[in-house]
Image: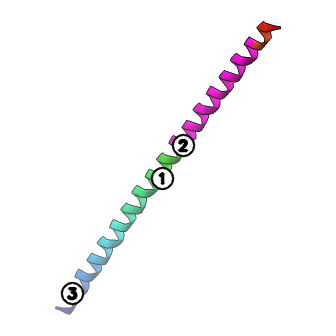
Amino acid sequence: MGMIDDAKDAAQATGKKVGEWVDDTKERVSDKADEVQAESAVKRAEAERDATKAKNEYKENLRD
């Protein structure tokens, strides 16, 4: 029975390690997705800022 118990323990340890690896991978993917969304929001805000600045400069030039 000792060998069967050892094999069972090894299989459980391996299963636990695989489960932890899967959880870590899911977390890394989620973190990367959050990072990409944040970068996208920053780029969108910068583009809106630049467009507003250009519009305001154009209006200022029309007043001159």
Span colored in magenta: 36-59
**Is residue 17 located in the magenta-colored stretch of the structure?**
no
Q: Give the mark toward the camera: 2 or 3.
A: 2
Q: Where residue 5 is drawn, which disc sits there?
A: 3
Of mark 3 and mark 1, the one earlier in the sequence is: 3
Taking 34 as reference, is 20 left or right?
left
User: Does the residue at mark 3 contact the one at mark 1 (Cβ under 8 Å)?
Assistant: no
Its colouring scheme is: rainbow
Helix, strand or loop status at disc 3: helix
Judging by the rendered image, the residue that carries numbered circle 2 is 38
Please determine whether, in this image, residue 54 is positioned above or below residue 8: above
Q: CA distance from mark 2 to mark 3?
A: 49 Å
Name the residue type under label 2.
Answer: Ala
Choose top left, top right, bottom left or bottom right for residue 51.
Answer: top right
Q: Where residue 31 is drawn, which disc sits there?
A: 1
Q: Give the mark toward the camera: 3 or 1.
A: 1
* Residue located at (29% from left, 80% from top): 10
Assess disc 1: are there few (<14), some (14-19) or many (≥20) residues with their C-alpha within 10 Å of its C-alpha: few
Of mark 2 and mark 3, the one earlier in the sequence is: 3
Q: Position of residue 2 (x, y in %)?
A: 21, 92
Taking 31 as reference, is 54 left or right?
right
Name the residue type under label 3.
Answer: Asp
Of mark 2 and mark 1, the one earlier in the sequence is: 1
* Residue located at (74% from left, 13% from top): 58
